[in-house]
């Protein structure tokens, strides 16, 4: 089967268009020069990367599902939030933070698979609107269940990385930021390796890009869709567990703003591009931090509208996002 | 004319029912019934866009916010007659809808959903920014508040006018163009439907109805316009209402509106779960189950049953 799947005409990986590449290089130079000249700038940039990778990993979860099924999962953030509560409950039962962390990831996988099988599969293949509304229903349902079980009161978890601060030159960098970046990058790399090097991953890529052909050569696309939802839930759980220490408190609205930024990041990078989602997330994280600090008109209130104005601008100039490719359709 | 006779009788009966209903209701229930009418107008608006023209929108709470703030600001600063603010909200949100429709011409499907979502998230932040004029997070109130009976009368009359308006828009050439765009943009263009005109028109009409609903929504919440009343959740609620009703059906809208307006209140006293959190659980489950079991919404149920009976 693997041999046959390898022969499927999957599109080759392409570099993003040269203007986009130039833009990214220019942004990198700007950030480096700025960081060298100003301590605050450097501090904001590093903190921006830390929030950005979290946006990016949730965006990646969205992209994973979008690539496989062409729908946006509006419940992605709430699923992540529910998993943070599961981790919280595990620590209450006496597990250490990291035991709870890894157990939660396993639970998240099962949760994702079950959600797909029970709620999404019956509407799979119907209109986009139908699936979107089911995920909206899931959003409300999970919110209600969490508030029922744990109430809407604020909870506190132990900080996974402590609150130590390192100094690189004169730039203070929180240990938590480094930990967040490391954990997220490790999980994203693991995911990439899974898709690149395992038989299951190959089958999933084939199923996402050429469903009919993949089925013909023996890929069980339906089962793999469920695995995709499971993996997305795991990524979401990582994002959630990394958001919680940054917010200091755990409450049911934990992931709602993160989900909004993840949407923006995913669209910025092009909904079909996993790398784009991550780059989009990091870019958004840095951009918001810098704009919030240096453009006084924006402050903290207008961050969201600014993020979405940027998003709208990208969509109008390049409707497929920075890393997306225009799909050619026959009519 | 004779062909339409049963429909006309049904309309007359419905009008009579809603005219007599308030006399049998307590003051609290009159307010609740008025909120059904408010949601009815909003769901009707979304149905024009999503159900008939095939353009998804999660941004209707933004249009409702604009309409609502129009009413509150006009009444607060200029003491305008509250009923006069409704057509004003209609006109302003029509313009806003056309403006949003222009960039939306380039987007479709999921991208359009996300762009309108962005709108719904961004608009409620604006009153916070310009708080000296709009009252910030505390909100801004109309110069006088209204009774539930007044609200009932005005909202249901407005709903009736909005219903008639929508029916007139959809029955002729315009409605045909909308449906053609929904079914196939390519086919519509090649039969001479100018996409740019009809899509922006659909956005305008849809937004205008949402704006009027927003005005009434503000009046129904003691005349207060507050940013967090118009959160994305409101958009999602309207979308759920439209989907439950059955997209592309005018009659289902009433059921959809009743569903989203009344279910949270009814399920607050649900057995087992009960209390305040129960309503979310019941609401969410209901939405999912309806979508799974009734692909064409409640309105699609009757033709489906008829087809089943014809088969048997």
Image (cartoon, coloured by chain):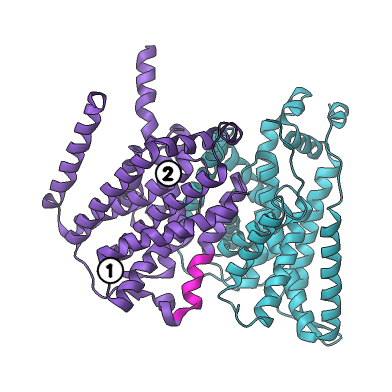
Which residue position is annotated with label 1? B222
Reply yes or no: does residue A142 show up in magenta: no
Q: Can residue B175 be seen in this view?
A: yes
Residue B87: where, in percent of width, then height?
A: 32, 60
Which residue position is annotated with label 2? B47
Which one of the lettered chains is coloured cyan?
A
Q: Position of B240 compared to B33: left or right?
A: right
Q: Position of A273 compared to B307: left or right?
A: right
Measured in 3D between alpha carbons, the distance from the residue under mark 1 to the one under mark 2, in whole angstroms, is 27 Å
Q: Of the residues under marks 1 and 2, which one precedes in the sequence?
A: 2
Q: How crowded is mark 2: few (under 14 residues within 10 Å), some or many (20 or more)?
A: many
**Residue B72 image-quadrant placement:** bottom left
At a point 43% along the width and 50% down the height, the residue shown is B206
Residue that protrudes farthest toward the top in the picture: B312
Element class at badge 1: loop
Q: Give the range drawn in magenta.
A: B122-131
Q: Do the residues labelled 1 and 2 touch (CB within 8 Å)?
A: no
Q: Position of A245 compared to B171: left or right?
A: right
Residue A99: where, in percent of width, then height?
A: 70, 60
Reply yes or no: does residue B127 show up in magenta: yes
């Amino acid at each position: 089967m693997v041999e046959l799947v390898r022969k499927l005409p999957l599109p080759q990986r392409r570099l993003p268009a040269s203007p986009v590449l130039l833009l990214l290089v220019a942004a990198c130079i700007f950030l480096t020069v700025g960081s060298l000249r100003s301590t605050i700038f450097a501090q904001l940039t590093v903190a921006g990367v830390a929030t950005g990778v979290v946006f990016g990993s949730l965006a990646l979860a969205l992209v994973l599902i979008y690539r496989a099924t062409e729908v946006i999962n509006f419940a992605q953030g709430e699923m992540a939030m529910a998993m943070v509560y599961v981790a919280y409950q595990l620590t209450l039962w006496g597990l250490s933070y990291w035991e709870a962390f890894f157990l939660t990831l396993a639970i998240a996988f099962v949760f994702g698979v079950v959600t797909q099988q029970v709620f999404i599969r019956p509407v799979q293949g119907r209109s986009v609107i139908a699936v979107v509304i089911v995920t909206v229903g899931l959003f409300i349902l999970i919110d209600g269940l969490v508030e029922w079980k744990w109430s809407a009161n604020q909870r506190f978890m132990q900080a996974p990385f402590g609150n130590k601060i390192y100094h690189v030159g004169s730039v203070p960098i929180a240990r938590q930021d480094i930990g967040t970046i490391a954990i997220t990058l490790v999980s994203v790399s693991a995911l990439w390796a899974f898709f690149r090097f395992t038989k299951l991953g190959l089958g999933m890529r084939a199923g996402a890009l050429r469903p009919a052909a993949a089925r013909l050569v023996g890929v069980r696309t339906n089962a793999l869709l469920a695995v995709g939802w499971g993996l997305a839930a795991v990524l979401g759980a990582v994002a959630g567990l990394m958001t919680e220490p940054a917010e200091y408190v755990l409450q049911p609205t934990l992931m709602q703003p993160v989900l909004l930024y993840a949407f923006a990041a995913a669209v910025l990078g092009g909904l079909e591009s996993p790398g784009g989602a991550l780059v989009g997330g990091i870019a958004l994280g840095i951009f918001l931090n810098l704009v919030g600090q240096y453009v006084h008109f924006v402050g903290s209130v207008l961050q969201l509208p600014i993020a979405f104005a940027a998003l709208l601008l990208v969509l109008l100039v390049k409707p497929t996002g920075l890393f997306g490719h225009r799909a050619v359709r026959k009519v | 004319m004779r062909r339409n006779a049963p429909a006309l009788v049904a309309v007359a009966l419905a009008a009579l029912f809603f005219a007599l209903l308030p006399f049998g209701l307590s003051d609290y229930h009159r307010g609740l019934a008025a909120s059904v009418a408010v949601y009815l107008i909003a769901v009707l608006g979304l149905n024009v866009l999503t159900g008939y023209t095939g353009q998804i929108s999660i941004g209707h709470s933004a249009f409702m916010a604009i309409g609502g703030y129009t009413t509150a600001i006009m009444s607060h600063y200029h003491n305008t007659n509250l009923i006069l603010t409704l057509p004003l909200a209609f006109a302003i949100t029509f313009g806003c809808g056309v403006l949003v429709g222009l960039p939306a011409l380039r987007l479709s499907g999921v991208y359009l959903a996300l762009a309108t979502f962005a709108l719904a998230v961004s608009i409620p932040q604006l009153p916070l920014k310009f708080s000296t004029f709009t009252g910030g997070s505390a909100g801004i109130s109309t110069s006088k508040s209204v009774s539930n009976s007044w609200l009932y009368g005005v909202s249901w009359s407005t709903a009736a006018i909005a219903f008639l308006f929508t029916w007139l828009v959809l029955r002729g050439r315009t409605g045909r163009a909308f449906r053609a765009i929904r079914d196939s943009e390519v086919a519509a263009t090649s039969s001479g439907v100018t996409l740019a005109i009809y899509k922006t028109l659909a956005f305008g009409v849809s937004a205008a109805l949402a704006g009027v609903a927003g005005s009434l929504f503000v009046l129904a919440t003691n005349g207060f316009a507050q940013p967090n009343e118009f959160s994305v959740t409101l958009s999602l609620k309207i979308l759920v209402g439209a989907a439950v009703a059955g997209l592309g059906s005018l009659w289902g809208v009433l059921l959809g509106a009743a569903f989203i307006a009344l279910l949270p209140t009814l399920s607050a006293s649900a057995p087992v779960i009960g209390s305040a959190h129960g309503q979310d659980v019941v609401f969410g489950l209901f939405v999912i189950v309806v979508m799974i079991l009734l692909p064409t919404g409640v309105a699609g149920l009757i033709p489906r049953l008829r087809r089943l009976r014809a088969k048997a």
